[in-house]
Image (cartoon, rainbow, N blue to C red):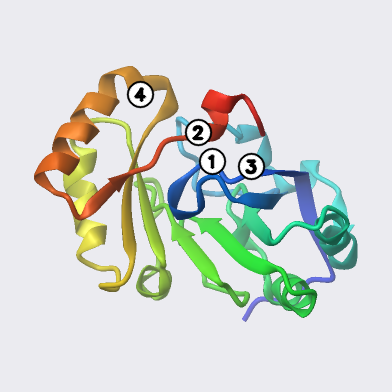
């Protein structure tokens, strides 16, 4: 069992609109934690990988960032946030009436009390069954044609209530978008997720 942390390595934090998935367009405060051992080659926040490069910030201070901005949702992301015990962070957020959302590869044991779990599995380190079963949203990044078959593997493993999203890898979106559109038209259980924050040029 992971040790409960009073502070966590915080790479960055900001108030913005959620850009992806089910809560696209919703006002959300992002807390990006340092540390990741998944190592996606196309990761756009590789500077988050080494947790030691980011300051340890008290959980109370992190929650205050969210409260001070009157944000209704706190999105815990990374890096890979589940490398850390998130019980105390989510407990403190919920005590203050803030919804708790997480974006995770699912490669580490689940900690924390979550209103919404976005599972984005990666080929480089497989997600754990316990996270797969509790996911509210499956968001698969499509980098090449073989990723569709890989996405279906996880769609078969999540709960029936889990929402299914396909998202183009940003640098290849011109090539991948038409493939995803055609795939969803044939497989309408899937929904298109776009990184709208990048179109809007917001964090």
Relative horizontal placement of residue 159, taking residue 49 as reference (left or right): left
> What label does residue 196 carry, if any?
2
Tell which circle, 4 or 1, labels the residue nearer the N-terminal end: 1
Residue placed under numbered mark 3 in the picture: 49
Q: Is residue 181 left or right of residue 49?
A: left
Disc 2 and disc 4: Cα gap in Å? 12 Å
Give the percent coordinates (x, y) of residue 137.
40, 60
**Residue 2: horizontal and vertical position, in percent?**
66, 76
**Picture disc at residue 173:** 4
Front-most of residues 1 and 73? 73
Q: Nearer the observer, disc 1 or disc 3?
A: 1
Q: Quadrant of residue 15?
A: top right
Residue 176 position (above or below residue 24): above
Of tags 4 and 1, which is closer to the observer?
1
How far, Cα to Cα, is label 1 from label 3? 22 Å
Q: Earlier in the sequence, mark 3 or mark 4?
A: 3
Left or right position of 62 against 16: right
Query: Circle 1 is placed at which residue position?
Result: 19
Where is residue 82? Give x, y as percent: 59, 63
Q: Is residue 94 above or below residue 197?
A: below
Q: Secondary structure at mark 2?
A: helix
């Amino acid at each position: 069992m992971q040790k409960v942390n009073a502070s966590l390595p915080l790479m960055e934090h900001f108030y913005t609109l959620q850009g992806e998935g089910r809560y696209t367009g919703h006002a959300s405060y992002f807390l990006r934690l340092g540390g990741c051992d998944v190592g996606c080659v196309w990761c756009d926040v590789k500077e988050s990988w080494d947790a030691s490069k980011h300051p340890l910030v008290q959980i109370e201070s992190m929650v205050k960032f969210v409260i001070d901005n009157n944000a209704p949702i706190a999105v815990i992301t990374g890096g890979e946030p589940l490398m850390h015990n998130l019980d105390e962070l989510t407990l403190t957020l919920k005590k203050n009436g803030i919804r708790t959302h997480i974006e995770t590869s699912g490669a580490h044991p689940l900690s924390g009390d979550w209103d919404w779990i976005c599972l984005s599995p990666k080929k480089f380190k497989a997600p754990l069954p316990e996270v797969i079963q509790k996911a509210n949203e499956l968001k698969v990044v499509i980098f090449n044609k073989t990723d569709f078959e890989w996405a279906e593997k996880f769609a078969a493993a999540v709960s029936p209530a889990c929402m299914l999203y396909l998202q183009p890898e940003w640098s290849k979106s011109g090539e991948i978008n038409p493939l995803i559109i055609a795939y969803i038209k044939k497989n309408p259980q899937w929904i298109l997720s776009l990184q709208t924050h990048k179109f809007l040029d917001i964090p």
